[in-house]
Image (cartoon, rainbow, N blue to C red):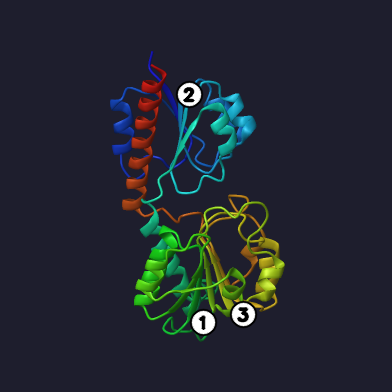
Amino acid sequence: MREKILISTSSFGSCGDEPLELLRQKEYQIVINSFGRKLTSSEVIELGKGCAGIIAGVELLDGPVLEALAGLRCISRCGVGTDNVDLEKARELGIMVMNTPDAPTRAVAELTVGVIFDLLRNITRGDREMRRGGWYKGMGNLLVGRKVGILGLGRIGRTVAEMLIKLGAEVSGSDIKPDPKWLKANRVTLRSTGELLKESEILTIHVSDAGEGHLIAAAELESMKKGAYLINLSRGGMVDEDALYQALKSGRLAGAALDVFEQEPYTGTLKELDNVVLTPHIGSYAREARLEMEMQAARNLISGLRNLKKEKT
């Protein structure tokens, strides 16, 4: 009998048939997310019945969901973060969890640099005003000489830093496990989170998991340099969106860009503001990066299920 797998991420295969073809060659019985959006827990349970593996997006795979999926042996995250998966429960149940940390790096880094230019030069705001019949010519700023703080110096954070340094920005960063050799080679100054908040004219978040609560809440926003810009392309929930709204509306912050949100699709009050750039979780949505990420996720699932089968025998 063919093994059954669920592809729960909604956009799988949109950049090419190669990942699906790879899975079909292994003769899996494939269940597809046909909703075109993030699945609810009940939908994951319903679609995942009898599945040995899941190629997962950002849907919640907590303890109750994992316990309901009898026979599940491998979760292959199509992406970097695994904070949507209860890793402790997965270990308890003997479920292997894998991710694709390398593929989206360049795509997310380039989008980060893109929204920084957008904010500094009022690109989106000017476009909005013209479409309304206006002619907004807000004075912008150059990136050269800007003090940029990077929260999280993993693969993506380091790539963002290297790009910005080449463009003339002054880069500092913080990380729980900094790489001294990389910092020295790239002349990046290591700072505490508190120091970055106070000093940075542009603060960009590249932390994969902040634990419980918001990494940037009202107190952190209040401590930021007045007129600074905040960017979050990492994980939804890193930033207190209500507190950010107040900071932007009051002029405490000059602007912000968000690609990830606590609830997606996002329908909140930040949409009312002109000094914020909102994108619908497209950090990895560069065709080349997305295809490679899906190929890695498919290979991970195949190798994971094969190795688990060998261990069982």
Distance from the alpha carbon under mark 2 to that under mark 3: 50 Å
- Image position of 60 (left or right of 292): right
Q: What element carries label 2?
A: loop
Q: For the residues carrying marks 2 and 1, which lies nearer the camera in this image?
A: 2
**How far apart, in angstroms, are the residues tagged by discs 1 and 3?**
29 Å
For the C terminus, the image quarter is top left
Q: What element carries label 1?
A: loop
Q: Up-down: is 144 above or below 130?
A: below
Mark 2 vs 3: CB contact within 8 A:
no
* Residue 210 falls left or right of residue 303: right
Q: Return the residue at label 1.
A: 135
**Residue drawn at x 36%, y 21% as measured from the top left:** 310
Instruction: Name the mark nearer the viewer: 1 or 3.
Output: 3
Q: Which residue is drawn at 41% across and 19% down?
A: 312
Residue 198 spot, x, y in % from top left: 61, 78
Image disc number at residue 225: 3
